[in-house]
Image (cartoon, helix red, strand yellow):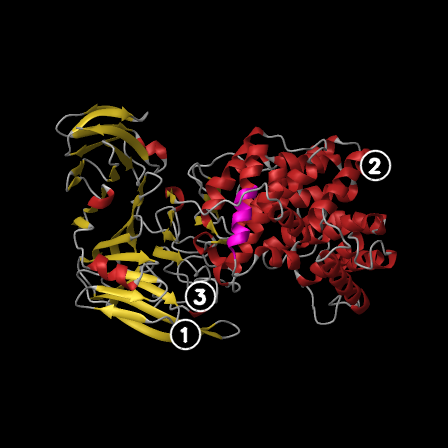
């Protein structure tokens, strides 16, 4: 153990290094960088002081509580009150700054809670997280802030309790509950434990044990090269555990800067790279999309906006450790988010929750030399986490799928018990003015069997169906697609959760539309199967023209359904622990009871007017369906020069042929060139040959995996070992003949 290498007397000797760590911890976590006498800080600090005084005055230590009404174990509320008091002690302008009586009350409270609840040898009942992360981090935070007001006896006893529940061996192996965000949190606890007793060995361990977090992974928890972040083995989690990891690392980088334990691991660059590759793609106008928020989606209204703020705050803090170029880009991105978030203005919310973030954000917003980055346009496909995000001017869409490596959904700790079908091709989308579509009590009120974009068996499921913690992976391996960064073809071989349902679903992401195909829809559950074209939380007027094959939802967008009868429902739905009611408009296709190879075709037109929707429906040649079967699905869009096919098996669709399952996207650019993008969603091809029946003069830009190319009357490309590319897209550029 590293701690054993430090002489016992040295482990308790304060020195400049720990004075620096204490100062950095206070500045980074409690807050700094603002004028306490200026508004809004003066008012917020006064309120903090008033809350701390109220907690101090009402503290009444008893056998089963520290405050009346907060019965032990009170894992969150009681430690948090002590933390609030400690922050009022160290922050200026609270009216209690440096108040010895307040600090003494904090010390008394910490020791009382330690003796009654968090005692060495106590039985850690309930969730392990409280004992190893939540409680020790908050208690240690308060203890470090009040410094010498915690007596040596109290400090030693708290140290012993933390060492009991969080021994050094928790950081020996990078496995189980000591990976990803949990590992960062455990290292934070270890560092605070080091600061508490000026222990160089613990500080060194806290820093060195972060190293397994940084490298890319190809399975399990962590960051993937395509930008995916996974926690709990099979759940995409940038919007919860990932946000905690980013915050924790940004904090540790800042606190340890300039100390003997500064983080210098060269792999830390992966974290900087992931700001733009992993986190930013899932933040739109300051909110974090629910498709990477796991079981926490229904915890609170506008929780997606709160997570977006947390990510923004972490990015700005992390910028202090990044290069000047990275820092400048990140500041522009966050400024753009803050300016466009009008539903829950970021600066106002920061004032209520994080004064340090408020000061940083206010400085950026007030600096005319820092530009505000626009929402980017383009497509991001993350095959290793079965997620896709498509951005075009005025609208954005996100797609959530399940695969043999990604769970249908996650439930645990009593949360998200009806999220069964969020991995069944749920298609989120946001048009201008509707950034709160899934924010305002959507999850407690929506019909869980009718999530937008999904194909589901209506077989009734129990709350918490399937194994907890995301262990609900279906057998389907063909999940992913191909993208050139602007457009994409994405597909999912869908297997229903606790159902016999099987389906093949494809989405073709274009400029102003998403073409949605379904085929091979089969089930034997004895219940109807439905494809949910949409389920909007709105009371907007709906227009349906069955004869012309279109529908339009005022202020939201349009739908074109060339070959199906659309079913519709307008209803008020009530749900939640504190019941709320919301209006919904549901549009769906009924495939009947136990369908055999049913299918569908429809176009989603986000933000389209009624006239634009009607015009698209009157132009059946705009998008031509080349195939829609359980063997392949493909479309051609002549006006965009796009031909795209998802080959579930080898075969031919239009002018494209493939000798193995794959995704192919061809784009003719109008300048005499074209690109052909391929991928291996199943990640098992040692070789793939794709043929395009189109005259091609030459290959302008190949790819390292392109082993042969034949041009002339048609183009034949052969790729080697796509299996190693983790479902990633590979592009070849050619000159047309």
Frontmost of labels 3 and 2 is 3
Residue that sits furthest to the left in the current view: 713
User: Which circle marks residue 573 in the picture?
Assistant: 1
Magenta stretch, residue numbers = 331-341
Between the C-alphas of marks 1 and 3, the distance is 10 Å
User: Which circle marks residue 13 in the picture?
Assistant: 2
User: Which circle marks residue 290 in the picture?
Assistant: none
The residue labelled by disc 3 is: 442
- Element type where label 2 sits in the image: loop
Frontmost of labels 2 and 1 is 1
- Element type where label 1 sits in the image: strand
Of the numbered discs 1 and 3, the one sitting upstream in the chain is: 3
**Camera-side residue: 313 or 243?**
313
297 w.r.t. 639: above or below: below
For label 3, count other residues whose C-alpha is less than 10 Å away and answer few (under 14), some (14-19) or many (20+). many
User: Residue 543, how many percent across, how many down?
Assistant: 28, 70
User: Residue 254, how many percent across, how many down?
Assistant: 67, 39
The reply, left or right, for residue 733 in relation to residue 65 is left
Q: Main secondary structure of the magenta part?
A: helix
**Camera-side residue: 375 or 153?**
375
């Amino acid at each position: 153990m590293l701690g054993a290498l430090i002489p016992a007397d040295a482990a308790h000797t304060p020195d400049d290094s720990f004075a620096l760590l204490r100062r950095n911890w206070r500045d980074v976590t409690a807050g700094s960088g603002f004028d306490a006498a200026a508004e809004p800080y003066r008012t917020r600090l006064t309120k903090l002081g008033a809350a701390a005084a109220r907690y101090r005055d009402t503290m009444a230590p008893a056998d089963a509580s520290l405050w009346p009404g907060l019965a032990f174990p009170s894992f969150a509320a009681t430690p948090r009150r002590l933390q609030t008091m400690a922050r009022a002690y160290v922050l200026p302008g609270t009216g209690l700054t440096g108040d010895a009586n307040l600090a003494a009350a904090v010390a008394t409270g910490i020791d009382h809670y330690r003796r009654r609840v968090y005692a060495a040898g106590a039985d850690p009942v309930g969730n392990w997280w409280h004992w190893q992360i939540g409680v020790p981090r908050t208690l240690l935070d308060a203890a470090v802030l009040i410094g010498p007001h915690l007596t040596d006896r109290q400090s030693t006893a708290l140290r012993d309790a933390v060492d009991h529940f969080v021994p050094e061996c928790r950081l020996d192996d990078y496995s189980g509950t000591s990976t990803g965000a949990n590992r960062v949190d455990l290292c934070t606890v270890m560092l605070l434990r080091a600061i508490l007793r000026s222990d160089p060995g613990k500080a060194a361990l806290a820093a060195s044990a972060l190293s397994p977090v940084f490298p890319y992974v190809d399975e399990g928890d962590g960051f993937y090269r395509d930008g995916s972040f996974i926690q709990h083995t099979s759940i995409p989690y940038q919007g919860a555990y990932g946000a905690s990891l980013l915050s924790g690392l940004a904090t540790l980088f800042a606190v340890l800067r300039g100390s003997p334990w500064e983080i210098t691991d060269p792999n830390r660059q992966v974290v900087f790279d992931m700001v733009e590759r992993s986190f930013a793609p899932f933040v739109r106008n300051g909110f974090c999309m629910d498709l990477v928020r796991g079981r926490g989606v229904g915890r609170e209204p506008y929780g997606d906006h709160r997570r977006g703020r947390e990510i923004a705050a972490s990015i700005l803090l992390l910028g202090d450790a990044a290069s000047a170029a990275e820092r400048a880009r990140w500041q522009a991105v966050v400024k753009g988010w803050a300016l466009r978030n009008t539903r829950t203005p970021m600066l106002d919310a920061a004032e209520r929750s994080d004064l340090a973030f408020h000061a940083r954000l206010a400085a950026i917003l007030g600096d005319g030399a820092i530009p505000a980055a626009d929402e980017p346009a383009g497509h991001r496909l993350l095959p290793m986490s079965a997620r896709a995000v498509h951005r075009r001017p005025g609208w954005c869409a996100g797609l959530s799928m399940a695969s043999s490596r990604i769970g249908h959904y996650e439930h645990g700790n009593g949360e998200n018990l009806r999220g069964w079908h969020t991995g069944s091709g749920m298609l989120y989308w946001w048009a201008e003015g509707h950034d709160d579509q899934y924010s305002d009590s959507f999850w407690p009120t929506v019909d869980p069997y009718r999530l937008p974009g999904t194909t589901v068996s209506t077989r009734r499921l129990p709350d918490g169906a399937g194994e907890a913690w995301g262990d609900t992976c279906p057998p389907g391996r063909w999940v992913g697609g191909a993208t050139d960064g602007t457009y994409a073809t994405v597909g999912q071989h869908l297997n229903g959760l606790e159902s016999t349902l099987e389906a093949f679903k494809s989405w073709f992401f274009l400029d102003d539309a998403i073409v949605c195909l379904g085929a091979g829809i089969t089930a034997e559950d004895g219940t109807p199967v439905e494809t949910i074209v949409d389920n909007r939380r709105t009371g907007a007027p709906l227009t349906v023209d069955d004869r012309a094959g279109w529908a339009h939802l005022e202020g939201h967008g349009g739908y074109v359904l060339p070959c199906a009868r659309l079913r519709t429902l307008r209803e008020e739905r009530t749900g939640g622990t504190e019941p709320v009611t919301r209006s919904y408009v549901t549009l769906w296709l009924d495939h009947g009871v136990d369908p055999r190879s049913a299918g569908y075709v429809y176009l989603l037109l986000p933000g389209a007017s009624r006239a634009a929707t009607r015009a698209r429906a009157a132009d059946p040649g705009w998008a031509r369906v080349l195939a829609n079967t359980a063997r392949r699905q493909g479309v051609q869009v002549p006006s965009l020069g796009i031909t795209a096919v998802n080959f579930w098996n080898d075969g031919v669709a239009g002018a494209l042929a493939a000798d193995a399952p794959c995704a192919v996207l061809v784009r003719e650019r109008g300048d005499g060139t074209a690109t052909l993008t391929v991928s291996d969603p199943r990640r098992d091809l040692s070789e793939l040959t794709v043929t395009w029946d189109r005259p091609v003069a030459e290959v302008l830009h190949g790819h390292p995996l392109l082993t042969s190319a034949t041009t002339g009357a048609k183009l034949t490309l052969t790729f080697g070992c796509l299996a190693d590319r983790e479902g990633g897209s590979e592009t070849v550029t050619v000159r047309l003949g």
